[in-house]
């Protein structure tokens, strides 16, 4: 009989409790919820060695998000969700050797992400041979010879794909892309394809760089911060401190969101007296409860109001000098917005004209404006165009490249931005490939590779036969779960380099390998001594990260060691000047190469050892230099389109609860939204519940409504009456991924449309 791990209590959705949503975030409960599980699970000593080292200059970088560290760090420079991430990784609960004989893969496939993660840390390499239903422990040498042998046997290197998730360090990422390209493919899909890809495209095409144009200190200098499609209270909790500082310095904040998220309303800073005994700080001065996908219309409407104000008072509203010197496309934009149909804007946004007037007035009063955004903007069909509209609005009044102002996509995974800088991208530009080829004396492939969605397609069609994942959980994270599972099952070999079990280990190719790795909390000891790695945060600051606790098991290899041994097992026939064994011995050697290949990283080993690291150059931010083909920032004309909803349907967004990190489920509560002990809920406004003839608390089946008429359904979800925008609904990711067709992607960036799923709710059969 398979042993059900006694530590894991699956949620019984019948026990689900629904309370009132909170109107403030953090405070004392935040501290309590941070410390209690850490101390219970890791003990005092390991908690002290991890939590107190979190985000400190000589400690490690928190893996829970890419929020930057302030120059003035406090003793507790972490949040509740950072503490959860650390506890999840550093708790010494281990998957025992017997586990693999006890649990066939077919059984693991039926377990939840929560159960899988709770089995503990992976401790030894395991292999599932073709035709068998069990993984079994193997030696590292065996594992590398199986994988290397398979890769060498493929007819073309493009029959393999090398996925990366954004926790990977710069050093490991640099080696990984070097390995893939030396092997001969640009098939380097990554989590960013499902995340901020639209930001990269929208900003790249307008200002020439797909990264934030601000630094940490700009928040406190801004007159106005507009937060769009982002839930910082849960996903970037330390941002609330920066927002509080902005408010204290006289700044104003506007939140644009279909949901009145707790962290956007009020913040009780647990490090301050008024956060403990008082009401805390009000965050948003104005809340625009927008319909899903309505942001593009809102931004056009605000830009139009800015242009109208200029027409009324010529010369006094726009930043003419900036526009003339640095921008292109103003006349076309004016012409286009002159035609903007206010009725279409109101239909798309669900807002009143007066609310948009108020936002425009706030924008016009402010000299320095920051716009931040996350998944509520990027994961839409018109995500790229919406980001271009953000840039339009900012450019009109010169809000890029001056203190207190700028465009700020807030990245998710802690090093997703650094991985890109290091070359993890299926379409790195020629200059990078030239430098890489020159440094290592080989000819990198030039043809663009497959991104995440394209990788699933090619696995489905049998064109990609080997999948290697450096972290992450592609099958769990991507849209169209059933199609993704079938695609992975259609490969000849699937390989995951991971810390813990997840869905992607249970849906395997014919053969499969799991290679266990150390996490960022752990001391990485190599032949030349303890190593550190480096990471880049959302504002382009690069710094070192040192593990502080002993690895949970003796047989773990670092990601760098795994890649370097994989390269040795695979590349013997292919010549490059890379000293793979040397890289593993001493990571300084990798950083020397990074210095020569990656623009902005010259002298990397010295700069990374400076206190606090260094900041990568950024033309728009530093000198209003725009590396576009024309050298100018581009105002762009984007055809307005909004999500159409057939009668009887709702637009559903899939989002994160407070107790998860992406596909990792820490627990079953979503404290700020009032949900306890369950995740199978769908949030709908009371008006829509009534209009659809449903009732609060009822169970419904959620059907994805798409042209292909394929059955995509989530059964028995409880309807929760919730103050979301009309016509909109919300459910949790990753569960909701089954509803989204693979072909439903953002134009230009190919990012799955996770925030506008057309659904029909039907009462569940009893
Ligand atoms: N604790 C924790 N931290 C995390 C993560 C985690 O899972 N847990 N994940 C990390 C990662 S990889 C990422 S990318 C970030 C994600 O950070 P977020 O983008 O904040 O994450 P989501 O939960 O997807 O929330 C999307 C927000 O956008 C709103 N929204 C949805 N659609 C729209 C829309 O059409 N318009 C507007 N204006 N708003 C909309 C939703 O109501 C919600 O508030 O967080 C990172 N940090
Ligand atoms: N419907 C819907 N789908 C979405 C989203 C959404 O909002 N809605 N969001 C999208 C976004 S923004 C993202 S970023 C993706 C996330 O996609 P991924 O990055 O692929 O998924 P994660 O859940 O972050 O990956 C978690 C796994 O990473 C492994 N891991 C953790 N730490 C380490 C480490 O240090 N090293 C290694 N090698 N492995 C490690 C563990 O095995 C863990 O199970 O999902 C996307 N999918
Ligand atoms: Mo993300």
Image (spheres, rainbow, N blue to C red):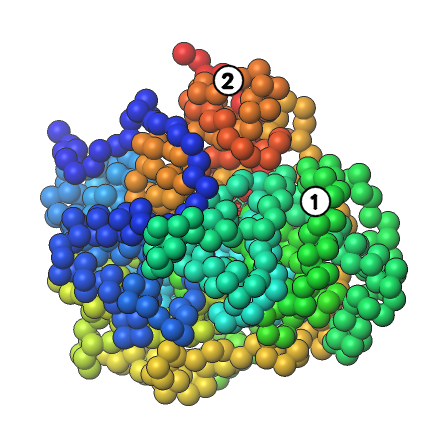
- The single residue placed furthest to the top in the displayed view is 766
Q: Which marked residue is nearer to the observer: mark 1 or mark 2? A: 1
Secondary structure of the residue carrying numbered label 2:
loop
Q: Which of 113 and 71 is in front in this view?
A: 71
Q: Which of 744 and 372 is in front in this view?
A: 372
Relative to 15, is 267 on the left or the right? right
Residue 78, given in percent of the width and then of the height, sits at 33, 60
Q: Are marks 1 and 2 in contact (CB under 8 Å)?
A: no
Residue 617, given in percent of the width and then of the height, sits at 53, 79
Whether the residue carrying mark 1 lies under 8 Å from ligand 1 is answered with no
Badge 1, how many Cα within 10 Å: few under 14, some, many 20+? Answer: some
Secondary structure of the residue carrying numbered label 1:
helix
Vertical side of 458 occupied by 161: above or below: below
Residue 343 placement: quadrant: top right
Q: Which of 108 and 26 is in front in this view?
A: 26
User: Which quadrant would the C terminus be assigned to in this image?
Assistant: top left
Report the residue marked by disc 1: 355
Say if residue 476 shows up in the picture.
Answer: no
Relative to 391, is 144 on the left or the right? left
Say if residue 90 shows up in the picture.
Answer: yes
Residue 669 placement: quadrant: top left
Residue 575, given in percent of the width and then of the height, sits at 38, 78
Instruction: Say the numbered circle drawn on residue 285.
Output: none
Q: Which residue is drawn at 24% across and 65% down?
A: 52
Instruction: Say the numbered circle drawn on residue 695.
Output: 2
């Amino acid at each position: 009989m398979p042993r059900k791990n006694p530590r894991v209590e699956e949620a019984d959705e019948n026990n689900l409790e629904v309370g009132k949503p909170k109107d403030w975030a953090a405070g004392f409960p935040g501290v309590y919820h941070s410390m209690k599980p850490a101390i219970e699970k890791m003990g005092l000593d390991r908690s002290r060695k991890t939590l107190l080292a979190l985000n400190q200059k000589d400690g490690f970088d928190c893996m829970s998000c890419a929020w930057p560290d302030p120059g003035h760090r406090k003793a507790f420079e972490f949040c509740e969700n950072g503490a959860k991430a650390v506890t999840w990784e550093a708790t010494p609960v281990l998957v025992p050797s017997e586990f693999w004989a006890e649990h066939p893969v077919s059984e693991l496939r039926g377990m939840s992400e929560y159960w899988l993660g709770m089995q503990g840390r992976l401790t030894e390499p395991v292999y599932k041979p073709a035709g068998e239903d069990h993984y079994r422990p193997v030696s590292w040498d065996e594992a590398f010879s199986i994988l290397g042998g398979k890769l060498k046997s493929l007819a073309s290197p493009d029959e393999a794909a090398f996925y990366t998730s954004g926790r990977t360090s710069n050093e490991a990422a640099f080696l990984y892309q070097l390995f893939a390209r030396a092997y001969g493919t640009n098939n380097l899909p990554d989590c960013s394809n499902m995340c901020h890809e639209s930001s990269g495209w929208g900003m790249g095409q307008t200002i020439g760089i797909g990264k934030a144009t601000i630094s940490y200190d700009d928040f406190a200098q801004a007159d106005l911060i507009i937060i769009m499609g982002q839930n910082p209270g849960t996903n970037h909790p330390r941002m609330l401190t920066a927002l509080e500082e902005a408010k204290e310095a006289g700044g104003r904040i506007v939140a644009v969101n279909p949901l009145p998220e707790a962290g956007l309303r009020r913040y009780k800073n647990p490090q301050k007296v008024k956060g403990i005994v008082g009401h805390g700080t009000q965050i948003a001065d104005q809340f625009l409860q927008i319909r899903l996908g309505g942001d593009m219309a809102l931004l056009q409407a605000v830009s139009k109001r800015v242009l109208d104000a200029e027409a009324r008072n010529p010369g006094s509203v726009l930043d003419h000098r900036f526009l003339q010197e640095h921008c292109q496309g103003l006349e076309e934009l004016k012409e286009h917005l002159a035609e903007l149909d206010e009725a279409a804007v109101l239909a798309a946004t669900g807002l009143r004209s007066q609310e948009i007037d108020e936002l425009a007035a706030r924008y016009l009063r402010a000299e320095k404006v920051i716009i931040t955004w996350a998944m509520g903007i990027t994961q839409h069909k018109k995500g790229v165009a919406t980001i271009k509209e953000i840039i339009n609005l900012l450019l009109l009044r010169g809000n890029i490249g001056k203190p207190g102002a700028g465009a700020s996509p807030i990245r998710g995974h802690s090093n997703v931005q650094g991985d890109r800088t290091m070359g993890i991208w299926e379409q790195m530009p020629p200059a990078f490939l030239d430098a890489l080829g020159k440094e290592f004396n080989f000819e990198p492939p030039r043809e663009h590779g497959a991104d995440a969605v394209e990788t699933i397609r090619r696995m489905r069609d049998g064109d990609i036969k080997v999948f290697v994942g450096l972290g992450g959980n592609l099958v769990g994270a991507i849209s169209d779960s059933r199609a993704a599972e079938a695609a992975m099952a259609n490969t000849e070999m699937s390989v995951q380099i991971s810390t813990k079990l997840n869905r992607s280990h249970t849906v395997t190719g014919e053969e499969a390998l799991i290679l266990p790795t150390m996490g960022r909390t752990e001391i990485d000891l190599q032949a030349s001594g303890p190593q550190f790695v480096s990471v880049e945060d959302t504002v382009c600051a690069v710094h070192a990260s040192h593990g502080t606790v002993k690895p949970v098991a003796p047989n773990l290899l670092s990601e760098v060691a795994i890649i370097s041994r994989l390269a040795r097992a695979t590349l013997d026939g292919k010549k490059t000047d890379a000293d793979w064994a040397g890289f593993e011995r001493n990571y300084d050697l990798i950083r020397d190469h990074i210095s020569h290949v990656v623009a902005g990283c010259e002298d990397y080993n010295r700069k990374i050892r400076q206190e606090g690291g260094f900041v990568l150059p950024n033309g728009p931010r530093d000198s209003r230099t725009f590396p576009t083909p024309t050298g100018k920032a581009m105002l762009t004309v984007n055809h307005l389109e909004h999500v159409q909803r057939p009668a009887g349907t709702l637009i559903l967004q899939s989002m994160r609860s407070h107790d998860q990190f992406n596909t990792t489920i820490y627990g079953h509560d979503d404290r700020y939204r009032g949900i306890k002990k369950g995740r199978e809920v769908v949030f709908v406004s009371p008006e829509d519940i009534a209009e659809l003839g449903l009732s609060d608390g009822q169970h419904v089946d959620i059907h994805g409504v798409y042209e292909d008429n394929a059955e995509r359904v989530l059964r028995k979800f409880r309807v929760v009456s919730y103050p979301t925008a009309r016509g909109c609904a919300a459910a949790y990711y990753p569960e909701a991924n089954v509803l989204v067709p693979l072909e439903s992607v953002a134009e230009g960036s190919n990012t799955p449309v996770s925030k506008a799923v057309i659904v029909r709710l039907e009462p569940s059969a009893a």
